[in-house]
């Protein structure tokens, strides 16, 4: 049984979100759920699944570099009663097999959890083919799929357990590097669909998801030093969205901000915009995310900087918008 | 070998399914139905349900049932009529075909209580799914067989071949692929649209035990189903005629999906054999 202790949180942070998911959480899931099956498309070792493959060869399927087939095989296994986690890079699992995700997870509602690793810009010099900037926009338009996006390695473990326990299709979006910065230093309650308020007070509310939660906290600290109090809300569940948390924020803050390592089109920013227009409240929304472009590539930090997603850049963008209110 | 009684019973079943399929197409009115690829698959469904597959319509979720994955989801005229003949769908339910809001869509939708394992419609989806079902069966040491029906046009889809590679890799001898090789697709003859050459030799090369048979001969189909490989997946290339059994539909791509007028229905029915084949006893 996994223990949610500060020592473990530090260990998991070193492994990153993917390492915590496939190197730690899956063993707990295998104990709890005898029908667990993990399917991959030639990304077993890279996903940190070596120990799992060795310990549970009967619970592991590698279909080779064939993502479309992976999703179909996973659905067949799921409909025979297995709880299936299928994994490869986020870009390929959501886009190469987009129609498969729609058909088997959305339409047939097969109990498959797809886990996309390396989402956002973290793939560095591998370049744009390996970046995942459109996935939230695409997957959230498909009915019946829950979308989860952990803020750090600890939340990655929590999300793995929650996804296994959730009866229905799930997309888990893993971001960040090894040595994932820690958002959570102590245990906290996690519930699918329930946003976590990390900083409760402020004239500005920042909704952040995935790797950007940590950067949003850092930006809030910078702004606090300048006298601007900023709330930070971790939207770990993109779908179904926690409408109450967004509504509450419109009553507390004068400015809303969304921050995501995803295109500014169709992701978290769009979700928040849809909510507030539906509510009919007039609160300005600053959407920060990846620009609508395929840029020249660089290392992770360079890529974040090119899109204004480093903490100082976030703070500056928020400050400018806040002052102009 | 197929016993004579079973053979005649299966032939009679095929005749009944084809009659019923034509009536279904008529009843679908101006919505139209997938006639060509439904009629080409009649004998395949008649043989599977009438003589080959293990199932119990009173217990449709039986773990040991054989699984039929209908990947060419548009052959519902053959599929729904077979489900009707064996107690999965009532006569009244069959009348719901292509009615607004009904569960009998133009492509079958998964509903185990009705004996429908898989949601078809998008081509190239059934074989990967069947591979997953077959792996699950192997690992659970279940004694069921997985049948998956695809069209020859459908084999244009790359996902089919990804799945075939994996069926062979995992030595899934509990799977049988049936290609309804009716040699026509939307835009014309398959060999003109995308010439894939010999499907049988490709399947051989992909590691399947492959048999090519007359897909309208229930005895030939039955014998092919009976010869299952050990340690490798099975494939049957069923040589069929699109629109089989209606002279003005056969070999005509225009009848892939079309409406059937009452006059055409009468002409088609006049060509159907009557159910008076005699058994030996």
Image (spheres, rainbow, N blue to C red):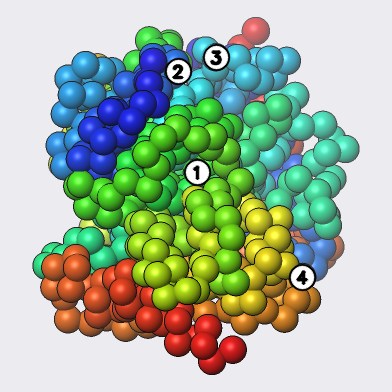
Q: Is residue A17 left or right of residue A47?
A: right
For the residues bearing labels 1 and 4, Cβ distance under 8 angstroms: no
**In front of the other: label 4 or label 3?**
4
Which chain contains the residue that carries disc 4?
A: A
* Residue mark closest to the camera, 1 vs 4: 4
Residue plotted at (52% across, 79% down): A286
Spatial distance from mark 1 to mark 4, Cα to Cα?
A: 27 Å
Chain of residue at mark 2 = A
Tell me which residue sits at (20%, 40%) in the image: A14
Q: Which disc, if any, is residue A170?
A: 1
User: Does label 1 or label 4 sit earlier along the sequence?
Assistant: 1
Label 2, secondary structure: give it: loop
Residue situated in front as seen by the camera: B49 or A135:
A135
The residue indicated by pointer 3 is B63
Q: Which element is circle 3 on?
A: loop
Q: Which residue is mark 4?
A: A279
Quadrant of image for the N terminus of chain A: top left
The label shown at residue A33 is 2
Residues behind callouts 4 and 3 on a single chain: no
Alpha carbons under labels 1 and 2: distance apart:
17 Å
Q: Earlier in the sequence, mark 1 or mark 2?
A: 2
């Amino acid at each position: 049984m996994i223990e949610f202790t500060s020592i473990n949180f530090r260990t998991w942070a070193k492994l990153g979100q993917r390492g915590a998911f496939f190197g730690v959480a899956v063993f707990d899931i295998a104990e709890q759920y005898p029908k667990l099956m993990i399917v991959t498309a030639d990304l077993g070792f890279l996903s940190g699944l070596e120990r799992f493959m060795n310990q549970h060869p009967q619970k592991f399927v590698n279909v080779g570099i064939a993502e479309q087939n992976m999703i179909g095989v996973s659905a067949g296994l799921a409909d025979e009663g297995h709880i299936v986690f299928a994994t490869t890079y986020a870009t390929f699992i959501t886009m190469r097999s987009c129609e498969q995700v729609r058909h088997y997870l959305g339409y047939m509602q097969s109990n498959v959890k797809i886990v996309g690793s390396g989402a956002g810009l973290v793939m560095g010099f591998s370049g744009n083919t390996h970046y995942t900037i459109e996935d939230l926009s695409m997957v959230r338009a498909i009915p019946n799929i829950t979308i989860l996006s952990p803020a750090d390695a600890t939340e990655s473990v929590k999300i793995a357990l929650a996804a296994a326990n959730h009866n229905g299709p799930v997309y888990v979006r893993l971001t960040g590097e090894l040595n994932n910065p820690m958002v959570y230093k102590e245990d906290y309650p996690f519930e699918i669909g329930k946003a976590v308020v990390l900083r409760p007070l402020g004239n500005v509310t920042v909704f952040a998801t995935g790797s950007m939660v940590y950067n949003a906290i850092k930006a809030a600290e910078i702004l606090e030093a300048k006298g601007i109090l900023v709330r930070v809300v971790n939207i770990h569940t993109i779908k179904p969205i926690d409408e109450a948390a967004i509504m509450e924020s419109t009553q507390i803050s004068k400015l809303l901000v969304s921050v995501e390592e995803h295109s500014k089109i169709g992701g978290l920013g769009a979700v928040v915009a849809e909510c507030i227009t539906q509510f009919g409240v007039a609160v300005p929304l600053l959407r920060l995310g990846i620009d609508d472009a395929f840029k020249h590539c660089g290392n992770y930090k360079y890529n974040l900087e090119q899109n204004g997603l480093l903490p100082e850049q976030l703070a500056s963008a928020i400050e400018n918008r806040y002052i102009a209110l | 070998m197929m016993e004579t009684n079973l053979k005649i019973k299966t032939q009679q079943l095929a005749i009944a399914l084809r009659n019923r399929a034509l009536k279904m197409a008529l009843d679908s009115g101006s919505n139209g139905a997938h006639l060509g690829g439904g009629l080409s698959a009649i004998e395949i469904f008649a043989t599977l349900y009438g003589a080959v597959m293990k199932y119990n319509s009173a217990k449709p979720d039986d773990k040991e049932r054989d699984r039929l994955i209908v990947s060419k989801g548009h052959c519902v005229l053959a599929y729904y009529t077979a489900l009707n003949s064996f107690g999965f769908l009532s006569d009244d339910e069959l009348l719901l075909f292509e009615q607004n809001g009904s569960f009998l869509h133009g492509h079958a939708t998964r509903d185990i209580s009705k004996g429908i394992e898989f949601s078809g419609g998008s081509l190239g989806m059934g074989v990967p799914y069947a591979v997953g079902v077959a792996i699950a069966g192997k690992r659970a040491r279940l004694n069921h067989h997985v049948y998956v029906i695809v069209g020859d046009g459908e084999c244009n889809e790359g996902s089919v071949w990804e799945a075939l590679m994996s069926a062979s890799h995992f030595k899934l001898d509990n799977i049988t692929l049936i290609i309804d090789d009716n040699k026509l697709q939307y835009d014309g003859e398959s060999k003109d649209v995308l010439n894939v050459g010999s499907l049988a030799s490709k399947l051989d090369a992909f590691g399947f035990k492959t048999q090519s048979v007359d897909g309208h001969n229930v005895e030939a189909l039955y014998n092919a189903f009976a010869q299952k490989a050990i340690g490798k997946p099975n494939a049957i290339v069923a040589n069929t005629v699109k629109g089989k059994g209606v002279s003005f539909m056969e070999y005509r791509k225009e009848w892939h999906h079309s409406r059937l007028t009452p006059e055409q229905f009468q002409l088609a029915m006049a060509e159907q054999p009557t159910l008076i084949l005699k058994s030996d006893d």
